[in-house]
Image (cartoon, rainbow, N blue to C red):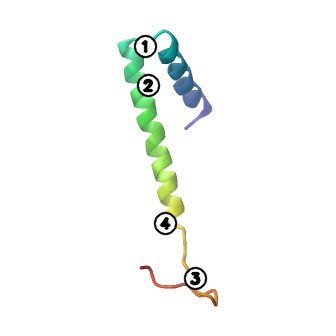
Amino acid sequence: MDRAKISRINELAKKQKTVGLTDAEKEEQSRLRHEYLALVRRSFKAQLDSIRFTDDTGSDTPEQ
């Protein structure tokens, strides 16, 4: 996700706390949040998938 979208998420969050959001802004905020969370989940899953367990000798152990 690019910095512009993250900045927009933050702008909408600040506006929501101060003056509130229009319906269109609420939809935009929801769409951006879902996009961001999907990216975080994919990244986290990739990190978990890359973990390899080893025994004391450094050999890979079977998945449990």
Question: Could you tell me how far apart the alpha carbons at marks 2 and 4 are, in whole angstroms?
Answer: 30 Å
Neighbours of disc 2 within 10 Å: few (<14), some (14-19), many (20+): many
Label ID, residue 54: 3
User: What residue appears at the point 44 percent right and 79 percent down from the top-left corner?
Assistant: 63
- Which label's residue is closer to the chain start, 2 or 4? 2
Q: Amino acid at mark 1?
A: Leu
Q: Quadrant of the C terminus?
A: bottom left
Q: Amino acid at mark 3?
A: Thr
User: What residue appears at the point 47 percent right and 58 percent down from the top-left corner?
Assistant: 45
Question: Could you tell me how far apart the alpha carbons at marks 4 and 3 are, in whole angstroms?
Answer: 15 Å
Label ID, residue 21: 1
Vertical relation: 40 (above or below) 27: below
Q: Secondary structure at mark 3?
A: loop
* Dots 1, 4 in contact, CB < 8 A: no
Q: Secondary structure at mark 4?
A: helix
- Judging by the rendered image, the residue that carries numbered circle 2 is 29
Residue farthest along the top direction in this orientation: 19
- Judging by the rendered image, the residue that carries numbered circle 4 is 49
